Every structure is written in C-alpha cells, then in structure tokens.
Amino acid sequence: MPELPEIETLRRDLSELMIGKSIKGVSVANRRSIRAHSTSGEFEQPLLGAQIREIRRKGKFLSIAVSSHYRESFALVAHMGMSGQLRSFANRSDIPKHSHVVFELSDQSLIVFVDPRTFGQLYLDELDKSGLATSLSRLGIDPINQPELIYEALQGCMDRKTGIKWMLLDQSHLCGIGNMYADEILFRAGVRFDRPCQTLRAEEVLAIADSISEVLNAAIISRGSSLRDLQYRDVAGGLGGYQSMHQAYGREGLECMRCHGIVERMFFNGRSSFLCRSCQR
C-alpha cells in the first residue's frame, strides 16, 4: 500500500501537471472507485469545468481543491488503497487495464486513476477553513507538515499497553505511516515492533520521533518505495528508489546492516514485521 512518501511524490508531480488547468471531461468506468457516491453523475457533474487550484496531502490522502460554477470551492479526495495509481497519459490508446476513472484536462492531457485491486477510491468533499477536505480532520498529526509535534504525539500514547508499531499504524495519532515504514522507523530507532508503549524510556521515544522524520524524508527524496509487485508507480509510470535503502522491511534472512545479526520476519495480529532481535530491544 502506498504510504506517506509515495503519496507526497504523487502530490508534487500532480501539482506541476494539474494546478491552473481545468477539468474538461470525467468518465467513470468502475463505480467501485467512486463508491461514496450513489451515481456516476453525482461524481462527474460537479467536476466538469472545475479549475484545479491546489493539491495538498494529509497522511495517505490527497486533497485536490477545485472551484466551478457548480460549487465555489470543494475537494476531490484521492486514496490509493492497496494498489491505486494516478497516472498521466497523452492519449487514450495508452491507458492501461484497470483504469477506472479518467480526467481530461484543458490541455488535452489525461490523468487516470488505475487500481487493479479496487481498494482505493475518489470522492468529493467540502473544504474546511484551512483549505483541506473536511473528512481528513479525523486524521492525526501529519509528520512531514508538523515535525515539531511528532514527539508530543508519541508522548501522548506512552501510557498504553499496546505495541509501539500498532500505535504508529493508528492514523488518529500520526497519519501516513504504514507497515513498511513502521518497520524501517523502528529498526532505525533500535526498538522492537511489539514493545508496549508504556515500557519505552524517554530517550527511546525521542529516537523514534527522530527516526520518523529521517526515514520519511529520505524516502520522499528517493520518490518512495516500489516493491516486487511494482504496484506503486509515480505519475509518469516510474518506480521509486527507496526500496534499495530498506534496512529491515523485506530483508528476511539477510544480515543486519547494523550488528550483523539476521533479520527475521515475525507475524502478529495478521501483519508481518521485519526486525533484528539482536539490536532491536
């Protein structure tokens, strides 16, 4: 599933391609991709002629602010789910299989929502006073937009018995971190995924907070991670580069890059976690 670095890469690319242009046409081929709406027309009609003003991100969601004669201002929200992509094409003949929603822009270019597994979705929403889709207010702190608040958000959960990884995955505290980057963050911090939050010392919490910023920012610079299934691709269809820098995720049976122990894969609560038991405590 694309996580914060992959969605931030999409945001930056789409901003260059879409802002200032208008939506000339919208066509929905699979209504599951717009399942928040009762009909295709309910989704398509408000967007016809809408001008794209701004593209923002919170966690794993994109909030695209638009304005039209239908509504003065509203948001097109995109969530990639397990395999969603937003791709740019010059011609309809180039559009791949599993393309469920196509936006034709005023410069004739096409922005296409591709989603083989159909867990992702697009929907329309109101904007809050800050210019972000109102439905995203339920999410916690975005660690890229507000890095100074990461430690504070972590500290607020340190009285819990739950394992630290599950706190990182809870989008109501910090948003944007998924299974892959949680493993990378905790490896860098030297903390086991299943350590109860209430057992963490102040210096360990600080190490996790620092690791969140370091890992996510490094992954953004590398344009995200593309795994073996190649489900994540950028707007142009390119692959991310951060997967070659992973120190824990996907390295089962390989030597630890820090202590020369062996990276293991453990399963808990339906999720896999990669760690080195020799140097993660």
Image: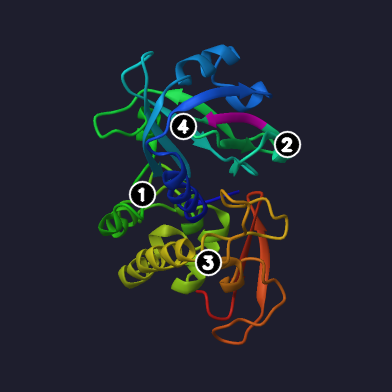
Q: Residue at x 56, y 86 (%)?
A: 259
Mark yes or no: residue 247 visible: no
Q: Earlier in the sequence, mark 2 or mark 4?
A: 4
Closer to us: mark 2 or mark 1? 2
Question: Residue 142: which disc?
Answer: 1
**Residue of label 2:** 93
Q: What span is in magenta?
A: 100-104
**Percent coordinates x, y for residue 117 in the rendering:** 71, 38
Q: Is residue 145 left or right of residue 6?
A: left
Q: Give the CA distance from mark 2 to mark 4.
A: 26 Å
Q: Secondary structure at mark 3?
A: helix
Q: Earlier in the sequence, mark 3 or mark 1?
A: 1
Question: Is there CB contact under 8 Å for labels 3 and 2?
Answer: no
| Above-or-below relation of 74 to 55 | above
Q: Secondary structure at mark 2?
A: helix
**Residue of label 4:** 77
Q: Earlier in the sequence, mark 4 or mark 1?
A: 4
Q: Earlier in the sequence, mark 2 or mark 1?
A: 2
Q: Is residue 159 left or right of residue 114?
A: left
- The amino acid marked with disc number 4 is Val
- The amino acid marked with disc number 3 is Glu
- The majority secondary structure of the magenta stretch comes to strand
**Residue of label 3:** 184
Q: Residue at x 48, y 19 (%)?
A: 48
Closer to us: mark 3 or mark 4? 4
Question: Is there CB contact under 8 Å for labels 3 and 1?
Answer: no
Q: Residues within 10 Å of mark 1 (few under 14, many from 20)?
A: many
Q: Give the CA distance from mark 3 to mark 4.
A: 28 Å
